[in-house]
């Protein structure tokens, strides 16, 4: 009798869990596709300093930077920052600067004291040379579409302290790149857009626009040193001074190119660790709210309640979700291919392993460098 009541209790817990997880996932679809009012054209476009941290010469860099140099914006400068004087990107950057003499641009390898965050150190190098009130932190993996810079600056409204862009993967080549696109788009971007529609923008380090005065109010670039991910630290600091963090209308297009499984694993592990240290409730609930987690608890519940076979229920649930996700991705105009359903399935199979690895991680390897992770409690005391 007691065992039967326990089973019944667990089954009803699974019922509630399935209902909440499915409703939340469907809500991200509705919020992401809900029509938005048109963006007002900006009356003025202030001079802009674009700070670009660079490490290595990824094959997509040249096209990305060409698109940046060719932006139709009244007045902007670009400051490239590289840590090592023998970095393979330096010759390419030199050629691009020479080819686009109409755009003020410089390359700096100035020494700075190390903060433990290589990307932030490069931003500190560039900061010395950025001369305008409006500042854009921009990764070399961002591909700007024509007119995107004008539209981005035009959305930095009063009361918004940080404007970022939702990273969306494009141009994947090979299966591992398709898998990374599945993590980016139907996975991460869907949730980020939904959160922004509810008024909670996320710091996304690929593209971050803010005013110099606001950055100085929070303590300058040094305010980004604490924590694991500089973009999350910056977003939290901006909120503390009463300003909003919002996502831009245009996505942050991210050409994937070719990927290795190891690179994909390290990137996704780093982002999971970011959520673990900067959004712990989201991290804890992530496996339970994933499409696979939702399908499993739904299959167990309906199998117990209706006496149906659980495995076909779980498989059918997951397949139906992949159809919904593919429709969402296509409606957004994002990348979708015949490999996408396979990539969705592999992504869901990887999530539990990635999550468990992130839960116990004490360090990360990022771009060939070991980064030690601070204790979660130490970060919470800093806040």
Image: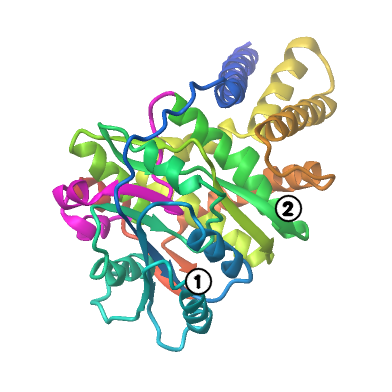
The disc at residue 367 is: 1
Expressed as whole percent of the image width and height from the top left, the position of residue 168 reads 59, 46
In this rendering, would 304 be left or right of 286?
right
- Relative to 63, is 219 above or below? above
Nearer the observer, 284 or 239? 239
Expressed as whole percent of the image width and height from the top left, the position of residue 101 reads 44, 73
Looking at the rendering, which quadrant does residue 104 occupy?
bottom left
Most extreme residue toward the bottom, as rendered?
A: 86
The reply to whether residue 255 is visible in this rendering is: yes
In this rendering, would 258 be left or right of 99?
right
The residue lying at 51 percent from left, 75 percent from top is: 99
Q: Can you identify the residue that label 2 sits on?
A: 178
Expressed as whole percent of the image width and height from the top left, the position of residue 12 reads 60, 14
Nearer the observer, 114 or 21? 114
Which of the two discs, 2 and 1, labels the residue nearer the N terminus?
2
Expressed as whole percent of the image width and height from the top left, the position of residue 124 reads 27, 68
In this rendering, would 211 be left or right of 299?
left
Secondary element at tag 1: loop
**Residues at marks 2 and 1, CA–CA distance in whole angstroms:** 21 Å
Residue 218 is covered by the magenta coloring: yes
The residue lying at 70 percent from left, 46 percent from top is: 349
Nearer the observer, 160 or 347? 160
Looking at the rendering, which quadrant does residue 190 occupy?
top right
Q: Residues within 10 Å of mark 2 (few under 14, many from 20)?
A: many
Secondary element at tag 2: helix
What quarter of the picture does the N terminus occupy?
top right
The magenta segment is 198-227
The residue lying at 25 percent from left, 31 percent from top is: 159
The disc at residue 338 is: none
The reply to whether residue 359 is visible in this rendering is: no
What quarter of the picture does the C terminus occupy?
top left
Are circles 2 and 1 on residues that touch, CB within 8 Å?
A: no
């Amino acid at each position: 009798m007691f065992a039967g009541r326990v089973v019944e209790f667990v089954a009803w817990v699974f019922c509630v869990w399935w209902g909440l997880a499915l409703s939340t996932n469907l809500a991200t679809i509705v919020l992401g596709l809900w029509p938005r009012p048109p963006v007002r054209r900006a009356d003025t476009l202030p001079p802009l300093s674009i700070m670009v941290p660079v490490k290595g010469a990824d094959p997509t860099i040249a096209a990305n930077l060409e698109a940046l140099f060719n932006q139709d914006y009244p007045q902007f400068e670009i400051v490239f920052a590289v840590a090592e004087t023998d970095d393979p990107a330096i010759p390419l950057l030199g050629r691009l600067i020479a080819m686009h003499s109409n755009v003020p641009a410089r390359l700096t390898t100035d020494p700075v004291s190390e903060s433990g965050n290589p990307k932030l150190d490069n931003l500190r190098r560039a900061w010395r040379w950025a001369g305008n009130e409006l500042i854009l932190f921009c990764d070399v993996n961002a591909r700007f579409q024509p007119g995107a810079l004008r539209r981005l600056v035009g959305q930095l409204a009063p009361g918004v302290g940080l404007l970022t862009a939702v990273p969306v993967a494009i141009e994947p080549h090979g299966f591992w790149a398709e898998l990374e696109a599945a993590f980016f788009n139907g996975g991460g971007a869907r949730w980020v857009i939904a959160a922004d529609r509810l008024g909670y923008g996320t710091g996304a380090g690929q593209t971050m626009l803010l005013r110099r005065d606001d950055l100085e109010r929070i303590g300058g670039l040094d305010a980004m040193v604490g924590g694991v991910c500089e973009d999350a630290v910056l977003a939290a600091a901006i909120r503390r001074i009463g300003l909003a963090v919002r996502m831009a209308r245009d996505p942050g297009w991210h050409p994937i190119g070719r990927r290795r499984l190891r690179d994909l694993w390290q990137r996704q592990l780093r982002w999971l660790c970011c959520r673990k240290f900067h959004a712990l409730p989201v991290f804890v609930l992530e496996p339970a709210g994933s499409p696979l987690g939702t399908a499993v608890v739904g299959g167990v519940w309906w199998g117990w309640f209706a006496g149906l076979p659980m495995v076909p229920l779980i498989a059918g649930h997951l397949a139906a979700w992949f159809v919904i996700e593919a429709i969402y991705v296509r409606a957004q105009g994002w990348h979708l291919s015949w490999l996408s359903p396979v990539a969705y399935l592999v992504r869901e199979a990887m999530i539990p392993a990635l999550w468990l690895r992130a839960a116990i991680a004490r360090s990360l390897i990022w771009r060939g460098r070991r980064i030690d992770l601070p204790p979660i409690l130490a970060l919470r005391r800093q806040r």
